[in-house]
Amino acid sequence: MSDMYFEFAAVLVFMLLGTLFLIGGLVFGWLVRPSKPTPEKNEIYECGEPTIGSAWIRYNSRFYTVALVYLLFDVEVVILVPAALVLREMAGIGIAWSALVGLLVFLLVLALGLAYEWHYGNLDWIGETGTSSKSISAEQEEEPA
């Protein structure tokens, strides 16, 4: 029982030393660095470019949808690489077919999800007027030059 408390005490000491190291570094930096604010230093800085307009603008909701689809397929790759390695190991002991079927079902579900998103137009980009990019390009083709 006392061994368990000793292990918890080691974790507690580690956390306290980490916190002390963090706070000590911040306090040391606060004491050492010079504080000479100027109007130029107090300006908003982003990528070296001067700011244009307000930061409170409405973003297109398609950014959110595209980000979710990206995360879906990013996680797919993270899962498929270790699964392929395990599949290779299972081939060595002769049970690769069951793992391969599971992997193919996983890919089929992802393909169905992609087809669903594509069918309902969630992968189409929306222009500023709220119409899809396909309808904007069709309207531009109809107008005489």
Image: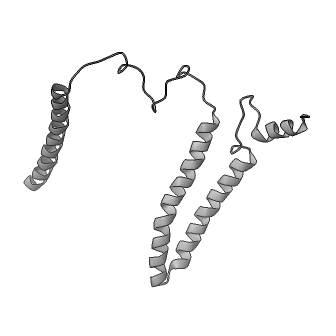
Above or below for 44 versus 77: above
Question: Could you say where residue 18 lies in the image, as x and y percent from the top left?
Answer: 18, 42
Percent from the top left, x then y, of residue 44? 42, 22
**Residue found 62% across the figure and 41% down from its top:** 65
Q: Residue at x 36, y 15 (%)?
A: 39
Q: Nearer the viewer, residue 76 or 1?
A: 76
Does residue 131 appear to the left or right of 56 in the view shown? Answer: right
The residue that appears at 90% across and 37% down in the rendered structure is: 142
On screen, residue 85 versus residue 13, left or right, reads right
Residue at far left of view: 2
Q: Quadrant of residue 134?
A: top right
Image coloring type:
one colour
Image quarter in which the N terminus is found: bottom left
Coordinates of residue 5 in the picture (x, y in percent): 11, 50
Nearest the viewer among 90 and 17 is 17
Q: Is residue 96 above or below residue 59?
A: below
Q: Is residue 101 above or below residue 142?
A: below
Location of residue 143 by image quarter: top right
Q: Residue at x 49, y 81 (%)?
A: 91
The location of residue 71, given as percent across then percent down, is 54, 49
Quadrant where the C terminus is found in the figure? top right
User: Does residue 15 appear left or right of residue 101 in this picture?
Assistant: left
Q: How many numbered marks does the figure carry?
A: 0
